[in-house]
């Protein structure tokens, strides 16, 4: 009986040593099958813990973390490719790589699917969730906290008298409420043109209609520099003439394509554009 406390103590010490050693030696082998989770990983974990990202991760027209992604292994979004690298975590979205994600689950691999961020307040929560999944909660908490503090500093109180802004993308695409970019407009103290005009959720708006009923601010949602007709319409002379000086601002689409800390750079630009409009109206 006298030996039991000592024996129990030795067992506990042994288990702590085993668990502590395993924790110190564990190296995540993480695969990402979605552009947004690619970039979240690059923010949270060392490069050597990432065994596969999408081909878009190093494309600077789509990814703000493109420089950090260069040199990482690119993985095909197939069941065979994912299972072959033996990951200990598979990250993905909810609308892409469905077959690969299903196969990963069926073979017993841990899978986490991250839905698109629809509001700025979704972003710190998603950062924390992914950080816990990859085993770096402290890093996630630091990033999420910094995001929340910057958001509070940039946030404007919305008003029915706020200037109206139209987000205009390739092919004349404009987006209504329910999107991340729409929420960024609201936080910048701007009203979405499509909501004010009652146009519905998403539309392709001809240049002629936009100019006939111009918003106070044209937000050019540019996804990259190219020679396509879809992109070239954003540089149409009629748009330049209709929205001169402070009535036009360009936001790279990569800033709000995914919910990331860099999305606040888009908010900052729009808040400055709103201030410029107000100065011009005095």
Image (cartoon, helix red, strand yellow):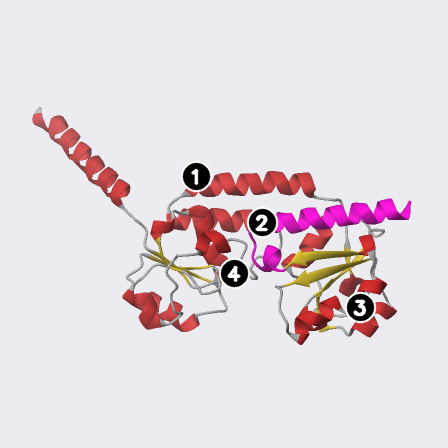
State which tag comes first along the sequence, 4 or 1: 4
Query: Which is in the foreground here, disc 1 or disc 2?
Result: 2
Q: Is residue 2 magenta?
A: no
Q: Which residue was labeled with disc 1?
A: 138
Q: Determine if residue 49 is in view.
A: yes
In screen coordinates, is 196 left or right of 77?
right
Tell me where residue 264 appears, x and y as whole percent. Answer: 63, 48
Tell me where residue 101 appears, x and y as whole percent. Answer: 39, 67
- Please report the bounds of the magenta region as a residue range: 253-282
State which tag comes first along the sequence, 1 or 3: 1
Q: Is residue 255 magenta?
A: yes
Label 1 – label 3 distance at C-alpha = 50 Å
Label 4 – label 2 distance at C-alpha = 18 Å
Q: Which residue was labeled with disc 3?
A: 237
Position of the N terminus, as image quadrant, is top left
**Image disc number at residue 115:** 4
Label 1 – label 2 distance at C-alpha = 20 Å
Q: For the point 78% across and 49% down, which residue is it?
A: 274
């Amino acid at each position: 009986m006298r030996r039991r406390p000592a024996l129990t103590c030795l067992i506990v010490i042994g288990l702590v040593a085993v668990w502590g050693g395993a924790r110190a030696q564990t190296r995540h082998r993480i695969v990402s099958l979605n552009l947004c989770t690619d970039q979240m990983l690059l923010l949270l974990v060392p490069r050597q813990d990432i065994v596969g990202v999408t081909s878009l991760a190093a494309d600077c027209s789509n990814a703000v973390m493109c420089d950090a992604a260069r040199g990482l292994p690119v993985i095909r979004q197939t069941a065979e490719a994912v299972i072959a690298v033996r990951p200990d975590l598979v990250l993905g979205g909810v609308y892409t790589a469905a077959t690969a994600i299903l196969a990963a689950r069926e073979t017993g691999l841990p899978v986490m699917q991250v839905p698109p961020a629809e509001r700025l307040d979704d972003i710190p929560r998603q950062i924390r969730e992914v950080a816990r999944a990859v085993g770096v909660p402290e890093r996630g908490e630091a990033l999420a906290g910094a995001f929340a503090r910057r958001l509070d500093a940039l946030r404007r109180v919305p008003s029915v008298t706020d200037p109206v802004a139209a987000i205009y993308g390739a092919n004349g695409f404009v987006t209504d409420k329910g999107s991340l970019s729409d929420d960024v407009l609201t936080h910048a103290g701007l009203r979405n043109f499509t909501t004010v005009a009652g146009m519905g959720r998403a539309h392709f708006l001809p240049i002629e209609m936009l100019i006939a009923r111009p918003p106070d601010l044209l937000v050019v949602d540019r996804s990259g520099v190219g020679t396509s007709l879809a992109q070239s319409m954003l540089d149409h002379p009629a748009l330049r003439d209709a929205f001169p000086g402070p009535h036009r601002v360009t936001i790279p689409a990569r800033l709000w394509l995914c919910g990331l800390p860099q999305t606040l750079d888009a908010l900052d630009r729009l808040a400055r554009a709103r201030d410029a409009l107000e100065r011009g109206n005095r």
